[in-house]
Amino acid sequence: MTRLDPFFTAALARIDRAGQRRVLRPAALAAEGRIVREGRRLIDFSSNDYLGLARHPELSARAVAWTQALGTGSGASRLVTGTSAEQLALEARIARFKHAEAALIFASGWQANAAVIAALAAAVPGLAVYTDRLIHASMHAGLAMAGVRQIRFRHNDLDHLETLLASKGADAPARLILTESVFSMDGDRADLPRLAAIAEAHQAALYVDEAHATGVLGPAGAGLCAQVPGQVDLVMGTFSKALGGFGAYVAGSQALIDYLVNTASGFIFTTAPPPAMLGAIDAALDLVPTLEAERVHLAALGVQLRTGLRALGLDCGESSTQIVPAVIGAEADALALSARLEDAGFLVSAIRPPTVPPGTSRLRIALRAGHSAADVDALLTALGDAR
Ligand code: PMP
């Protein structure tokens, strides 16, 4: 019992009244698109391990090798003693992968977005920031830390963005557009060529979160920013999803990276990433360009799944990737459907407010390269039965 418990209890009661209480349940990723949850082996349509690298022997072998060579901890923050030669080499490698001048590794994607966006806003007092309504919570955290009032455009509605650019923030010292290349809960894509042209026309900088595209889309899995070479000012992505590891990168100009090293709180005041994490990333970067067949397979599974969901009368929005929502509507219905699927042997998360807007609770189906066409058919059959 702590002195603050009455406050926690009151807050939890509010969460309960809204039917939004969450609990942690143990699970362990397995190969072939499976997961073991509470002793049961389920077909996993919930994890972001899109390429199956989280259980890849080369990643674990290199994590072990780097641990044996360099230790379990990095000892200090990056500017003190936490920068290994291996980490600098890895950052140079990521910069090449993203065709950028330089790159910087962060402890996590959440931390990268929050730290970088807060630092950008601090560099430019009065920065006008235009955000897609569905950007990730970590970008909102960075903007909130910096006290920035967002100018929000409707999701992927670039006409709306253009209207806002014409009517608001024209007198700001600089302008910044924030978006994701693949949206995490909808699996749809930003129109990067048009966004880049709009950014150019309005002299705005462009920041793109490639968390769900890295490894899965673009040439050699390098993400969608490859469609607009040299036109995205700042790209971030995670190692925690298709790359099967943990952590994140930010890539851009050398001036940007030098500025972040000198000012980004979430970079400076945290211990450098452990060698195991860096080793796994290094191995993932070796493998990702070779996984074209897996990328083609994931795309085919996406088409199969969307066709099947639509045949069941389910709305999967504008998804065109390995993330496919089945929008159900009411929270209770999405939860009930997810529970019935779990009974039938499938792990499919129900995503509900505040993660998605009210009334759009959904099943978020994440495809993994380890799935077969038969797995997707089995899921569709189970969904049909469960409804
Ligand atoms: N950006 C997006 C779009 C995400 O979906 C996520 C993960 N949920 C993050 C950033 C945060 O990345 P990480 O999980 O590595 O902290």
Image (cartoon, grey):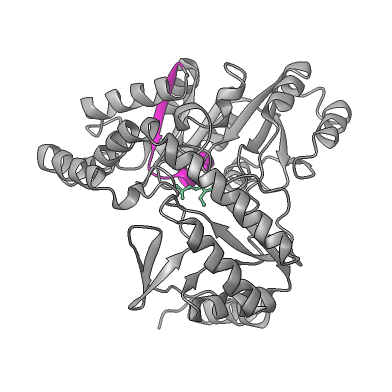
Q: Please state if 3 lies on the left or on the right of 151 as rendered.
A: left
Is 230 situated left or right of 51 in this image? right
* Residue 134 visible in the picture: yes
**Vertical position of residue 142 compared to residue 97: above or below:** below
Which residue occupies 57% across, 16% down?
Answer: 230
User: Looking at the picture, does residue 366 appear above or below residue 9?
Assistant: above
- In magenta, the rendered stretch is 101-114
Q: Is residue 98 above or below residue 154?
A: above
Spot occupied by residue 197 in the image (x, y as percentages of width and height):
74, 20
Q: Which residue is drawn at 57% across and 43% down?
A: 142
In percent of width and height, residue 351 lies at: 61, 65
Membership of 345 in magenta stretch: no
In the rendered image, residue 128, in percent from the top left (x then y), is placed at: 73, 30
Residue 322 in view of the camera:
no
Closest to the observer, 350 or 263: 350
Instruction: Please determine whether, in this image, residue 347 is positioned above or below residue 211.
Output: below
